[in-house]
Amino acid sequence: MKQFIVLAAILPLLLAMLFQFMLNEVHQSQSIAATRMVHNATMKATLSGGLTYTEMMTMKYDLAHIFGVKEYDVILTTSRRTIPMETIFDPPAPPDLITTETGIDDANVILVEPPKMVTFAYTYHAEVPVSRIMAANLMMGVSDAKNRGKWSCDFEVVSYR
């Protein structure tokens, strides 16, 4: 009888730890899938010059599908800023080829300055609410309202278009 009482007291705690491990695996797989999807969108945005409205709505739908939430719960924001090319790529000074030892005269050399290019940086922020962070939360004294979290991802795309 004593063993049955101990088993009845310990079994819910052991099951809660088992369920927590499984819930962590689910959240980890959701996070990996969402990160891969965001990375693919980032690569597409780099090549095409940013995400279009349709691509952003597709990304929003995919994030909602991955995490099992409504589409209006997913927050996706973007901003664009202009960066002068010199801040990204500052070419080194040309080597000193114009010397009297080489026999090249300064008057015959035309130095061409590289064109001033402007690039754009797009900053994207994705945020998805995640429910059921903790398995057996009521047994531990945590209400369903507090058993929530957010998955967020910030990424920046530099584009030349």
Image (cartoon, rainbow, N blue to C red):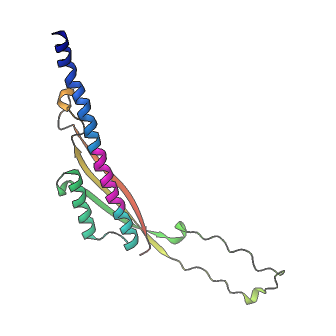
Q: Residue at x 47, y 74 (%)?
A: 118
Q: Residue at x 25, y 32 (%)?
A: 18
Q: Residue at x 76, y 80 (%)?
A: 98
18 versus 126 height, above or below: above
Q: Residue at x 78, y 87 (%)?
A: 105
Image position, residue 6 (x, y; %)? 20, 15
Image position, residue 101 (x, y; %)? 84, 80
Q: For the stretch drawn in magenta, what is the main secondary structure? A: helix
Rendered-image quadrant of the N terminus: top left
99 versus 62 height, above or below: below
Rendered-image quadrant of the C terminus: bottom left
Query: For the view shown, which residue lies furthest in the bottom direction?
Result: 108
19 vs 132, nearest the viewer = 19
Left or right, residue 99 beside residue 147: right
Image position, residue 133 (x, y; %)? 25, 39
Left or right, residue 117 beside residue 133: right
Whether 57 is among the magenta residues is no
26 vs 160, nearest the viewer = 26
Whether 29 is among the magenta residues is yes
Left or right, residue 118 beside residue 23: right
Q: Is residue 147 visible?
A: yes
Which segment did they paint magenta?
A: 27-39
